[in-house]
Amino acid sequence: MASLQIAQGVFRLSDTRTLHLPELAIHAGDSWAFVGANGSGKSALARALAGELVQLEGQRQHDFPRIARLSFEQLQKLLSDEWQRNNTDLLSADEDDTGRTTADIIQEEVKDPARAAALATQFGIAQLLARRFKYLSTGETRKTLLCQALMAQPDLLILDEPFDGLDVQSRGQLALLLGELSQQGITLVLVLNRFDEIPAFVQQVGVLADCHLTTTGPREAVMAQALVAQLAHSERLSGMALPETEEPRRGPALPPDEPRIILRHGVVSYNDRPILNGLDWQVNPGEHWQIVGPNGAGKSTLLSLITGDHPQGYSNDLTLFGRRRGSGETIRDIKKHIGYVSSSLHLDYRVSASLRTVILSGFFDSIGIYQAASDRQRQLTDHWLALLGLADAADAPFHSLSWGQQRLALIARALVKHPALLILDEPLQGLDPLNRQLVRRWIDVLIGEGETQLLFVSHHAEDAPACITHRLSFVPEGDLYRYVTQAL
């Protein structure tokens, strides 16, 4: 029986990025779907399976005589090339259009009119064989390339995002056709963006995150895993509204055109050693910032100035939400506009509490609950639990959850009051690739639904959620740091 096996495989993507495939075995007759978000390494996986990536470590062995890979990028290039023909001198004197027919495309590598006609009939495009390829619809071009790949009778067929750009009906038709190919014994690998695109015939599933193959196994077993179930759940949230804030009628209390943060020549020192040294920084409405720099650069110190937790905050020229620090505001006045998540907060949450209590405590900016919660607060907390896909775990001890689920709960805790400013200090620290992807997705979903602005601290620029608009970098310069701001 033919198979493709990879053990501890590391494949080169660029000078700084690699794809990691720890263990993978694809056997003849298998049907696989690999799922992951944008940037997770799905297309790279397809190329690695096809033998198109440079292998840096590990083993890749296979005895499939014929491997074929199809991708959306290949289709786009083929269409572009066909349209480009009109911009050349290929047109004869009596010709006003050019381009290959569907039959020409199907037989580009293997000339066999009878087989081409049979495949076109099977895929329902026989009536299109004489039509120019560039005039076909998206679904028709997808079926044409599939026929082209099948002309060579591949033993392993790798399809990268076969459902992209197709409407519901076309996706259903293509899924049925792929199921027929699977029944005929062709080994199929589908690379997909979404869990809900996995056709019913698929037997095995793999999950990618951050260019790591994190999970593989039988479909039912993989989908039953809590983290994968949450990631699949998060896909259905793009059009959903967040639960309301506690008092929605009050609306935002901040002027829409006033800077949220103004720090002029910020300085913080310990024992005459400067931690922050002359930082000028302004955060305007609608901006989402990532803050990057080495350990000890002062990133967390900067955040503690903003949250009101640092004693030297009152000796700095700092204006927050339109009020200059030290003008008579209370800590409560500061924190009511802020939601905060950090590794230190995560570690400080040692009190014995349920998941529901942790989220509910966000209304009080406390660790644990020390006053009566209103019915409205409890109702909104239940809405957040449902949004997280963790309603069934509402009464479970917080520390019985996975690390990633705890981080999601802390993010929800920070957002229950719809803060004007969400501060996430190293929210991905210590998480495995799947959990990192899950947390990043939640940040983008939650930030994208409301009026909240984000300050995101990370050691890695690539960890930034998609909503980030600006970056503040702490750049070493001798024994100190200089500060570089940029719009992205």
Image (cartoon, grey):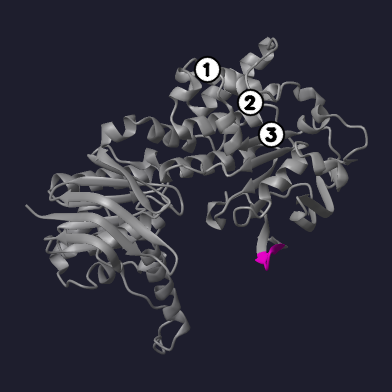
Q: Which residues are magenta?
A: 476-481
Discs 1, 2 touching: Cβ within 8 Å: no
x and y percentages locating residue 197 in the rendered image: 36, 42
| First of labels 3, 2 by sequence position | 2
Residue carrying label 1: 354
Which residue is at 69% across, 49% downward?
288
x and y percentages locating residue 444 in the rendered image: 58, 43
Q: Is residue 106 left or right of 16 when viewed as pictured?
A: left
Q: Nearer the viewer, mark 3 or mark 2?
A: 3
Disc 1: CA contacts within 10 A as few (<14), some (14-19) or many (>=20): some
The answer to whether any part of residue 145 appears in the image is no
Nearest the eye: 481 or 136: 481
The amino acid beneath tag 2 is Pro
Q: Is residue 265 left or right of 473 when viewed as pictured?
A: right
The amino acid beneath tag 1 is Ser
Which residue is at 60% across, 53% downward?
295
The amino acid beneath tag 3 is Gly
User: Real-space Cα distance between discs 1 and 2?
Assistant: 20 Å
Disc 3: CA contacts within 10 A as few (<14), some (14-19) or many (>=20): many
x and y percentages locating residue 361 in the rendered image: 64, 21
Disc 2 is placed on an element classified as loop
Residue carrying label 3: 339
Nearest the eye: 354 or 482: 482
User: Real-space Cα distance between discs 3 and 2?
Assistant: 16 Å
Residue carrying label 2: 243
Q: Is residue 466 magenta?
A: no
